[in-house]
Amino acid sequence: MKTETGALKPVYILAIETSCDETSVAVVKDGCEVLSNIISSQIETHRAFGGVVPEVASRKHVEVITLVIEEALSVAAISPQDLTAVAVTQGPGLVGALLVGVVAAKSLALAWGKPLIGTHHIAGHIYANRLVKELQYPNMTLVVSGGHTELVLMEREGEFQIIGRTRDDAVGEAYDKVARALGFPYPGGPHVDRLAREAEEAFPLPRVWLEPGSYDFSLSGLKSAVLNAVNQSKMKGLEPDVAGIARGFQESVVEVLVEKAVRAVREFSAGQLLLCGGVAANKGLREALTLRCAAEGIELIIPPPVYCTDNAAMIGAAAYVKWKHEGGIPLDMVADPGFSLEKWSVSAY
């Protein structure tokens, strides 16, 4: 859209993210400039339960969603009339949590007379990288989060092809389970990451490569190996080498992730490797991937931690791509906890 002088009119998208346990609202300009990104976390609430309780998460979203929307608009210093569209995470995620965001977004779109953009949560994580640097195509993304571990090829803007995924546990899920076995509270990933970097030696643990040439991942066997190591120590009346086990676990996970990601970049002639998802905040993974990509001459993009965990700025970035290619969608859109990334691709319409 152009102004009367012929210049391109800025696109301002108010984005809402409520797929799990963060209530977040952001205002993003032209898909890459974050004017506000408000995040209300529920970590302390769920810590008492050792993990996210879906019903509790939904109620917490209801309690704060209006306040977070108001703060996002205030920090961005923008009025609803100036917005181009309203975007929201349509899926995947916890259905009750998604519904809170979807209902809020529909209400705002209807009240303000703005188009609605249903957005894929993982597409948001991937396009969080555009908040750091302009993307080149084709590129490869390593998605590592609490519910997803995937290698995603983008040959063109907004087109997604999953070439590898976890066959059982996601990386973030495995980190939390291992942390629990080692005696750490939820969320456990940061504790394992810290201990792994402090340990002098790594407890030997297997690498799970699967079939030759496979880009899939499997973490259930590695998780079981950690549990066996802990239980065997206790059966002998010894204290488990918690730091060593943490380092062994992290080194095993990181080695497989890095190797398969680099191999995928080479095989598919990708110009960039992107890292995204909550586990992208893991320092051990970031450092290993940075060193390997530097040695291989691969351009690596990693968002800062605030854009790795769930946030609405990433949803605004992905929604901008959809807006450019497809515009808005009908208000009868529904939350979809099993939303397919590949079907959300702009080429799928």
Image (cartoon, rainbow, N blue to C red):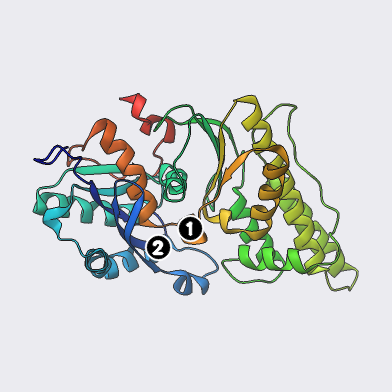
- Residue 238 position, x and y percent, is 88, 73
Spatial distance from mark 1 to mark 2, Cα to Cα?
A: 9 Å
Instruction: Give the residue drawn at x 57%, y 58%.
Output: 281
From this viewpoint, which residue is outermost toward the right?
A: 236
SS at circle 1? loop
Q: Residues within 10 Å of mark 1 (few under 14, many from 20)?
A: many
Image position of 217 (left or right of 246): left
- Quadrant of the rendered structure where residue 115 is? top left
Q: Residues within 10 Å of mark 2 (few under 14, many from 20)?
A: many
Image position of 159 (left or right of 253): left
- Foreground: disc 1 or disc 2: 1
- Residue 329 position, x and y percent, is 21, 37
Q: Which mark is residue 233?
A: none
Q: Is residue 31 above or below residue 304?
A: above
Q: Is residue 235 above or below residue 202?
A: below
Viewer-proximal residue among 53 and 277? 277
Instruction: Give the residue drawn at x 30%, y 53%.
Output: 28
SS at circle 2? strand
List the residue tagged with mark 1: 309
List the residue tagged with mark 2: 22
* Quarter of the picture holding the N terminus: top left
Q: Please say whether residue 85 is visible from this viewpoint.
A: yes
Q: Disc 2 residue type? A: Glu
* Quarter of the picture holding the C terminus: top left
Instruction: Give the residue drawn at x 9%, y 48%.
Output: 113
* Residues at discs 1 and 2 in contact (Cβ within 8 Å): yes
The number of numbered discs placed on residues in the rendered structure image is: 2
Q: Please say whether residue 336 is visible from this viewpoint.
A: no
Q: Disc 1 residue type? A: Thr
Instruction: Give the residue drawn at x 79%, y 62%.
Output: 245
- Residue 67 position, x and y percent, is 24, 70
